[in-house]
Image (spheres, rainbow, N blue to C red):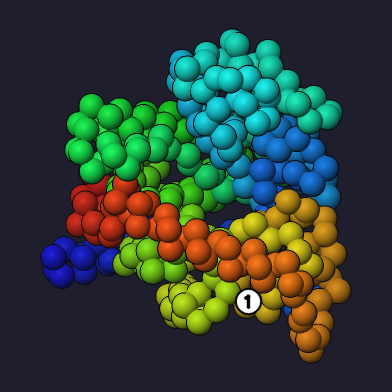
Amino acid sequence: MAESVGHYLSFRSTDKFPASFTFAKDTPQGKRPQTIAHRGYKATNPENTMSAFKGAVEIGAHGIETDLHLSKDGVVLLSHDATLKRCFGKDEKLIDCGWDYIKTLRTLKKPHQPMPRLKDLLEYLTTPGLEDIWILLDVKLLLPSLMEVLMCNKTALAKVDNYADDLFRRIAATLADVKSSRPWNQRILVGCWAAKYLPLCMKYLPGYPITHNGFSADYARQFLKVPGVGINMFQMLIVGPRGNSLLQEVKKKKADRSILLWTVNEESWMKWSIRQEVDGVITDDPKKFLEVCKSYDQGEKLRHSRESWKAILRQNIRVLMFGLAFRIKHGFWVDVEKVRKSLEN
């Protein structure tokens, strides 16, 4: 295994397109994290809609974070949820609905907007003058139940894996179908939650930078075995000694990977994120974060609200409860050998 890993490391280090476009920016005020709009400019628009994406671009966000699902007929959709209930008021799953039906729906939140496809966002970002705007793709996958995993329900697990394969394949096809003057692998960061799906990123999107979307510092460390794979962590769960240790470990391997934090909306935690020297902050209010970046004072003593500390405590308890279940469902470690083979093939 050591020899295979070493071969893979040297192979990966020669990639032409590292994630440099996601690194922190030099500004007149000093180096600052990039501003990444969470599901677009969510604070003022229905999330994951073209109005939210355009709003983020108009106020100066550097990047856009969005979520991907598949429709019944294989269209790559931009939606955080696997169902239509919360945003569109319909008791249906996306995977059970065709695009011809989905495109007729409008968000419950005003101004009422349709659900876009990945293709729609890509075509918008080919507009001259928008070449520097990049996208973090949060690839959402079907989740098996814990019982299905423990009982080794082969039918259910095969359905989950087939969906993942189909989604990555169709993402790649969509990127190939929409032409950009600046190559998409210099504008797209692929978000991968589970270790077991890292080979699919390599198989269908070779040359695209990857980041691990995560909430556990211990689980995230597995991804550091793979050169070029960045870290995109839930900010509430990076506070404290374990999170700080992970940040320092990533910084030591910084040459080909970025550090992002999500979802940061409180001003004091925005300043804290700047102080941690991360590369990007994902926020519902990109305009607010841009303003904080300009006014930030390195010497200011940061004070966080009691409510935010309570929220951090609650989230840490949740991770203790659900972290093991996540690993059982999605794998405990990164199979570097399998990743290497996927890349070479």
Q: Viewer-proximal residue, 49 or 122?
A: 49
Look at the picture and state if 208 lies above or below 265: above
> What is the count of numbered marks?
1
Task: Please provide percent x and percent y for residue 93.
Answer: 51, 23
Residue at 21% across, 33% down = 153
Place of residue 113 in the rendered image (x, y in percent of width and height, measured from the top left): 76, 25
| Label 1 element class | loop
Q: Residue at x 62, y 26 (%)?
A: 85
The residue lying toward the viewer, choosing from 3 and 330, is: 330
Which one is nearer the viewer's eye here, 163 or 169? Answer: 163
Quarter of the rendering occupied by the N terminus: bottom left
Q: Residue furthest top?
A: 100
Say which quadrant the C terminus sits in.
top left
- Left or right of residue 116, residue 288 in this image: right
Q: Compared to 124, does 282 lie above or below?
A: below
Q: Residue at x 68, y 30 (%)?
A: 87
Which residue is at a point 73% across and 26% down the rendered structure image?
A: 107
Answer yes or no: is residue 78 visible: yes
Question: Would you say 256 lies left or right of 6 here?
Answer: right
Q: Position of residue 95 (x, y in %)?
A: 47, 22
User: Which residue is identified by label 1?
Assistant: 277
Q: Circle 1: is it few (<14), some (14-19), or many (20+) Cα within 10 Å?
A: some
Residue 162 visible in the snapshot = no
79 vs 182: above or below: above
Place residue 308 in its image quadrant: bottom right
In the rendered structure, which amino acid carries the disc numbered 1? Glu
For this rendering, which residue is in front, 243 or 225? 243
